[in-house]
Amino acid sequence: MHTSISTQSVSLPRMPLRDTTCAGATPVTLDDVTHPAMVWAEMRGLKWSTVKMRRMRGYSWRQALEAGRRKSPWMDNWAPVNDAQMRRIDKEHERREARRDPFRR
């Protein structure tokens, strides 16, 4: 028996990092009412691309379909390491403000 291996490369799709299903026809139930996701987006005045991006960022369907803009939480828990770092940040802020208004003293 002779077995040969092909020299062609095979490209496999990467596994998703999380369940981010966001097809427009996906049935979504909110408060015991079910509609396709795209219909929910239209009813709430959202662009479908906005809903898809929210889903890709890990939002639940309820969160993704909430009207209004989102504030990014990525810096919410940031804190300077020490007082020296805080002073350096303050000085940099003062320099930037001085560049904006050269007549400010």
Image (cartoon, rainbow, N blue to C red):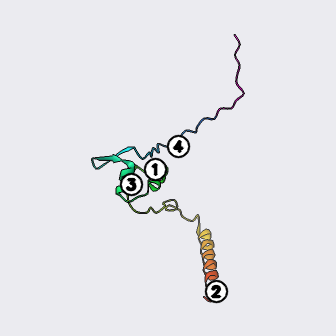
Q: CA distance from mark 3 to mark 4?
A: 24 Å
> Label 2, on which residue?
102
Question: Where are the magenta residues, as a range?
Answer: 1-10
Q: Are marks 2 and 3 in contact (CB under 8 Å)?
A: no
Q: Are marks 1 and 4 in contact (CB under 8 Å)?
A: no
Comparing marks 1 and 2, which lies closer to the viewer?
1
Kindly identify the amino acid type of the residue bearing the numbered disc 2: Pro
Residue nearest the observer in this picture, 67 or 63: 67
Residue 97 picture location, percent across and down: 60, 80
Judged from this view, the residue extending furthest toward the top is 1
Q: Which mark is residue 17?
A: 4
Report crowding for label 4: few under 14, some 14 to 19, many 20 or more residues within 10 A (C-alpha): few
Kindly identify the amino acid type of the residue bearing the numbered disc 4: Leu
Residue 98 picture location, percent across and down: 63, 82
Drawn side of residue 84 relative to residue 59, left or right: right
- Name the residue at 46% across, 63% down: 71
Residue 14 picture location, percent across and down: 58, 39
